[in-house]
């Protein structure tokens, strides 16, 4: 049998968030999760550290996407043509 084609990933919630969010919104999104992970003790603390690293990377990537969106919007508002 022929292998089944994989579905194309779609992340509408992330796309919608990035279209409207600011850098402070990204920080506010991750703040409660980071606080909860910081409070872990015992054997879960090690897993919490790994999760914190992954969340920090995700936060960094989302912030970068928001910054790029803001830059593109600002560039699109500048007058076009020769100088």
Image (cartoon, rainbow, N blue to C red):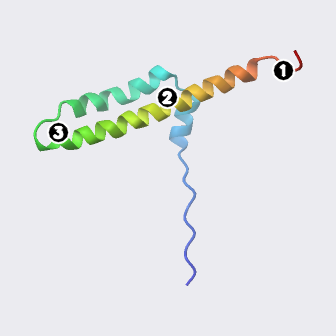
Question: Quadrant where the N terminus lies?
Answer: bottom right
Q: Residues within 10 Å of mark 2 (few under 14, many from 20)?
A: many
Q: Name the residue tied to disc 2.
A: 63
The answer to whether mark 2 and mark 3 are in CB contact below 8 A is no
Does residue 43 sit above or below 32 in this rendering? below
Judged from the image, the secondary structure of the residue bearing numbered disc 3 is helix
Q: Residue at x 72, y 22 (%)?
A: 75
Apparent side of residue 43 relative to residue 58 in the rendered image (left or right): left
Report the quarter where the C terminus lies: top right
Q: Where does residue 48 sit, x and y in percent of width and height?
A: 23, 39
The image shows residue 81, relative to residue 63, as above or below, that is above
In the rendered image, residue 12, in percent from the top left (x then y), is placed at 55, 43
Quick check: marks 1 and 3 in contact, CB under 8 Å?
A: no
- Give the x, y percent position of residue 82: 89, 19
Q: Which residue is mark 1?
A: 80
Pointer 1 local density, CA inside 10 Å: few below 14, some 14–19, many at least 20:
few
The residue that mark 3 highlights is 45
Q: In the picture, residue 32 is in which quadrant?
A: top left
Give the residue furthest to the left. Answer: 42
- Quadrant of residue 71 within the rendered picture: top right
Sequence-first tag of 2 and 3: 3
Characterize the local packing of mark 3: few (<14), some (14-19) or many (20 or more) Cα atoms within 10 angstroms: some
Q: Secondary structure at mark 2?
A: helix
């Amino acid at each position: 049998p022929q292998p089944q084609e994989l579905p194309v990933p779609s992340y509408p919630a992330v796309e919608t968030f990035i279209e409207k969010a600011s850098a402070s919104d990204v920080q506010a999104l991750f703040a409660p999760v980071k606080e909860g992970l910081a409070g872990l003790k015992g054997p879960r603390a090690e897993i919490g550290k790994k999760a914190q690293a992954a969340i920090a990377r995700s936060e960094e990537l989302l912030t970068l996407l928001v910054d790029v969106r803001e830059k593109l919007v600002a560039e699109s508002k500048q007058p076009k043509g020769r100088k």
